[in-house]
Amino acid sequence: MNASIEIPKDSKVYLNKPYVQVFWSPINKILTSRWIGFCTFDEIKAVAQRIIDAVTFEGARKVLYDAREIEVLDEESQKYIAGDFTKEMIKVGIEYSATVSPLDVFAKFSVDDIQNTIKIPEASHNKFFQDVEEAFDWLKSK
């Protein structure tokens, strides 16, 4: 199933792999990561570093995580995302994030576990959505 929207033509593409796309919208000033299928911990960590680099380079304050097509995340990846990655994203300037929930129920459990594990007060500006357009519009309003 590939319900994802196309990368807008005016976007700056930071990563375009079969399992993830990372791109910056200079007009809306939103960094988007679109996850597809299964990723190993090493892939998650490498993409996370690329996202952090893009946030730093662009001075991004808002990020959209489109997880509709992601598959289940292993426990090590979940801990990394909920801990070090989230702390680093806040440190480099992210103020708002929107996560579009996975369509797969088991993948949704993984994402829910990440959200429930995050204990960083600054991460409270993360909102969950079922629809990518709603998530994007919410970020644009921030």
Image: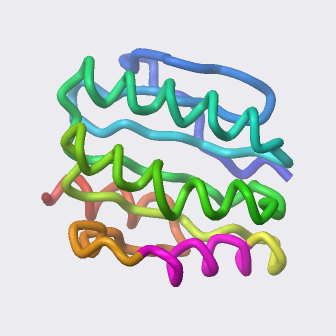
Please tell me in which quadrant of the rendered image residue 107 appears: bottom right
Q: Identify which residue is drawn at 38% across, 77% down.
A: 119
Count of marks placed on residues: 0
Q: Residue furthest left?
A: 142
Residue pictured at 66% horizontal, 63% vertical: 78
Predominant SS of the magenta segment: helix
Residue 73 position in % (x across, y down):
78, 60
Q: Is residue 4 left or right of residue 73?
A: left
- Quick check: is 113 in the magenta stretch? yes
Q: Nearer the viewer, residue 3 or 93?
A: 93
Measuring from the top left, give residue 106's x and y in whole percent: 83, 77
Residue at (39% x, 62% y) in the render: 98
Is residue 26 or residue 107 the one in the foreground?
A: 107
Q: Which residues are magenta?
A: 108-118
- Does 19 sit above or below residue 63? above
Look at 34% across and 69% down and name the residue there: 126
